[in-house]
Amino acid sequence: MSSESAGEGRKINVHFFDFENPVISGIYKFCYLVLLSVVWLIFCLPVFTAGASTTALYYTVHKNIRNDRGTVWSCFWQSFKENFRQAVPVTLLLLAILLVFGADISILNLFQNMEVFSGYLRSMFCILTVALCVYAFWIFAYMARFRCPVRQLLKNALLLAVVHFPSSLLIVLTGALALFLIWFLEPLLLIVPAGSVYLMSNFTERVFRKYISEQGSQPEDY
């Protein structure tokens, strides 16, 4: 009797540590999200590689974290290498526009005697900055899923961001929540980047699936 009980206990323990166990699967995914966030931060350090790193982050979140294919590092490195040449000039373009917006806001802060007028302009540039960040996310998400020339990439991402405005708005809200969490508790920087992209990918993938089904095609490597 006791040996049978011990045998059942061993079976229960083995089953508990099975990856298909929802609890264990959740723990693994949490650890993977932390690892992916750290890798993303490291590869963003040169700044001009931030776009390639974000593309690889999105690719890995969807392929590995969501669909359990490959490993975190293999997926990230594969996407980073494949999209590096295309992502760098796009990143530099977006950074240049972002710097212009930032400079305009800083200059407007100097005009204290035109507070009302400069306030309107500051608000406008802040909105444009948020819109640029959302546009950038659509660009790198699209780059992670499809292969096309840069001009077509920028055009398609812009159309998707505008036509699917509700999804873009949800991306803004998710991004705002992510920034608040990092501001509130800085150590969350180790989980929030990959975690927020995991949430945002729900909105973009819903859009991508719609166009994939209409065209009867499949994105590369998915």
Image (tube, helix red, strand yellow):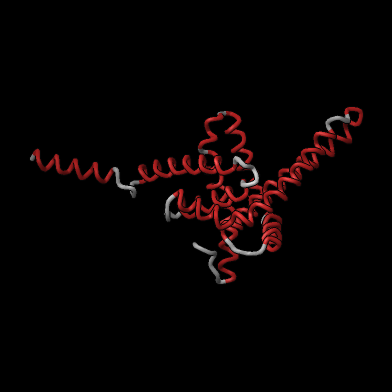
Indicate left or right for 94 with 198 as reference: right
Q: Residue at x 84, y 39 (%)?
A: 121
Residues 19 and 165: in front is: 19
Judge whether 149 appears above or below 7 on screen: below
Q: Residue furthest right?
A: 113
Image position, residue 72 (x, y; %): 45, 49
Residues 36 and 184: in front is: 36
Q: Residue at x 34, y 50 (%)?
A: 20
Judge whether 169 appears above or below 143 on screen: above
Image position, residue 143 (x, y; %): 60, 57
Quadrant location of residue 130?
A: top right
Judge whether 189 appears above or below 211 on screen: above
Q: Residue furthest bottom?
A: 216
Image position, residue 192 (x, y; %): 54, 39
Residues 16 and 49: in front is: 49
Indicate left or right for 104 with 181 as reference: right
Q: Residue furthest left?
A: 1
Q: Quadrant of the N terminus?
A: top left
Quadrant location of residue 125?
A: top right
Quadrant location of residue 16?
A: top left
Q: How many marks?
A: 0
Q: Residue at x 47, y 39 (%)?
A: 34
Indicate left or right for 59 with 30 as reference: right
Image position, residue 62 (x, y; %): 50, 53
